[in-house]
Amino acid sequence: MPWQFGKYNRRTFQYSFQAMEHFIKESRQLYDQIHSRAPEYWLTHSQGPIIKEKFVSQSVLIFGVAGIEALANCVLKEFSLRDKNSLPESMLSKNQRNNEIEFWRLIDKVYFLPTLCNKDFSPPAVYFKRDSTIFQKFAELIKIRNSMMHGRLSASILLIELKPGLVKEIDDDIEINNWPITGIKKDPSSFNYSSAQIAFDTISWVKGTIVKLVDAIDNNYLESEQITLISDIVETDADKAYLKSNFRDFIKPKYLKDIENDE
């Protein structure tokens, strides 16, 4: 029976964006469920929906930023026409000059991506305005994601209204407790549907901008996962298990080297 080996590149950003879109819908459903009841209701009933809304809402941000990172890495790997040395030094920070692009911060990869991949050399500002509100929001969302993932401590200021007896009213709705650009509360336990919607809208804009560039280069790239044949046709009576165990004997060396370098 004839056999042949092939390879394909699983583009993880597709699944990250699907997850982001799923979780924003679920977050909205939980939000509507919570706000269909008076606040007093939740004082005597299960807090499950309130807690779940926060977890689901945080997932919108986490999967969204992960999707942009995966998309940027894939596009840079497959479509880069230039490396950092082809960019004017005045365009780069010291950190960017000293590190390969794969080790740059995500915000810098996104900012320079169109310039690195477009055949017509144009400064990054043609595509992304660093000082625009929407781009600054995205930069801040990356910081929020990092603070969640790395468990950074963040103190909050409280205003306590003292009342007779043991009753106290606590209010933490104070500007300094919020991230300055998105207005999202710094306390990750406060991240809810409203915060998730800010993240979703901003990340969708960044994604859309990159997708337009990619579509102009290859309008089939984002939809297809093309299989590349990486061996000759193998005519053998050996069973599938043997071929799978001994794949190195059949795959062409140049492809085998690429696959092993990706490990």
Image (cartoon, helix red, strand yellow):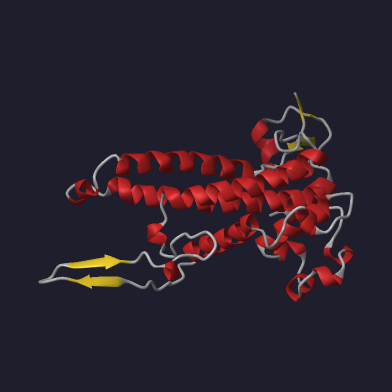
Q: In front here: 262 or 222?
A: 222
Seen at 75% across and 45% down, the residue is 248
Left or right of 237 in this view: 48? left
Seen at 32% across and 49% down, the residue is 50
Q: Quadrant of residue 208?
A: top right
Q: Position of residue 36 (x, y in %)?
A: 29, 39
Q: How many marks?
A: 0
Seen at 26% across and 72% down, the residue is 160
Q: Position of residue 150 (x, y in %)?
A: 49, 66
Residue furthest bottom in the image: 94
Q: Quadrant of residue 142?
A: bottom right
Quadrant including the C terminus:
bottom right
Q: Is residue 216 above or below residue 174?
A: above
Left or right of 113 in this view: 33? left
Q: In front here: 15 or 117?
A: 117
Q: Is residue 199 above or below residue 242?
A: below
Q: Quadrant of residue 230?
A: top right
Seen at 72% across and 33% down, the residue is 224
Q: Position of residue 96 (x, y in %)?
A: 76, 70
Quadrant including the N terminus:
top right
Residue furthest top in the image: 1
Q: Position of residue 110 (x, y in %)?
A: 71, 56
Left or right of 139 in this view: 49? left
Q: In front here: 179 or 258?
A: 179
